[in-house]
Amino acid sequence: MAPRRVVVFPSSTELGPVLARLVTSRAQEAIRSHGRFTLGLSGGSLVSMLSRELLALPGLDCSKWVVGFCDERLVSFDDPESTYGLYKSQLFSKINIPESGILTIDTSLLVNECAEDYTRKLKKAFPDDHFPVFDMLLLGMGPDGHTCSLFPDHPLLDEEKKIVAPISDSPKPPPQRVTMTFPVVNSARCVAFVSTGGSKAAVLKGVLEGREGPAFPAARVVPTHGELFWLIDEPAAASLTIDVERLGSGAKL
Ligand SMILES: O=C1O[C@H](COP(=O)(O)O)[C@@H](O)[C@H](O)[C@H]1O
């Protein structure tokens, strides 16, 4: 298990460019080693930061990228809650990723069927893996400690067999979603959390310094063989007492 790296930036302004360069460095490594880069994206506040920062990089080439979703809300793609819809307008429509390289859910299906259909799509994209091994997953964390659509005290936290699970009682709207499960998240070669803002400070302390076990879903993200980064800003790090790395916008991870 690679050591966890908790990296604190003065603000999201410094964090953003480092995140973008981390993604492209892992993309280059993956393409060199096995010809493509598989990336799992989260929604929420990540969408606009990641899109803006990737688009700011000169000469970004996404022709060998395969992109999936760590979780997705079961709403039509033109709904403002659709993670795919947001990435399409803010990122995919502006880069050279092939359409076949974007693994989307089928929003016409009921939530259980949607999860099964997405499972089939991931199995097809990762034919050699029992659980898909993504080169990189980008995760967010809600103020309740949820990540993907894996919420505190939900039975899905203990899912060990499924690749993608349906959820129809998400405490955060919209209620119907599909989500990668922990076995998939923890199989990734690199996982990077991005968490910014003072509203995350208390939960971040619980997740990163929790003494009495992993009560928060985000604390269960411990890649078996992969790297784990927590990229956070000073307001989110305000309550931490553990040792962290403090870096600026020029850093290379
Ligand atoms: O609902 C969701 O929330 C989490 C966290 O979002 P944030 O806006 O607090 O960063 C996100 O990672 C997940 O993909 C999304 O569906």
Image: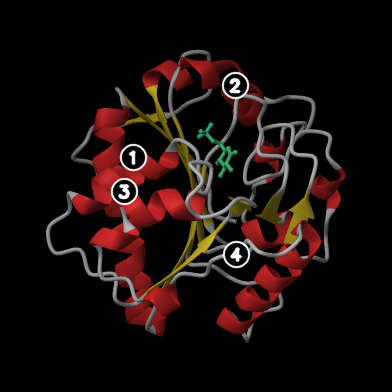
Q: Quadrant of residue 94?
A: bottom left
Q: Earlier in the sequence, mark 3 or mark 2?
A: 3
**Which quadrant of the figure shows ligand 1?**
top right
Tell me the residue at 59%/16% (across/down).
Answer: 202
Q: Earlier in the sequence, mark 3 or mark 4?
A: 3
Asked if marks 3 and 1 touch (Cβ < 8 Å), the reply is yes
Tell me the residue at 80%/61% (across/down).
Answer: 112
Instruction: Give the number of the mark in front: 4 or 2.
Output: 4
Q: CA distance from mark 3 to mark 1?
A: 6 Å
Question: Mark 2 is on which residue type?
Answer: Lys
Tell me the residue at 65%/47% (across/down).
Answer: 221
Which residue in the protein does label 2 denote?
205
Which residue in the protein does label 4 denote?
105
Q: Position of residue 49 (x, y in %)?
A: 33, 40
Q: Earlier in the sequence, mark 1 or mark 4?
A: 1
Question: Furthest-left residue in view?
Answer: 58
Question: Mark 1 is on which residue type?
Answer: Met
Q: CA distance from mark 1 to mark 2?
A: 23 Å
Callout 3 secondary element = helix
Question: Mark 4 is on which residue type?
Answer: Ile
Question: Mark 3 is on which residue type?
Answer: Ser
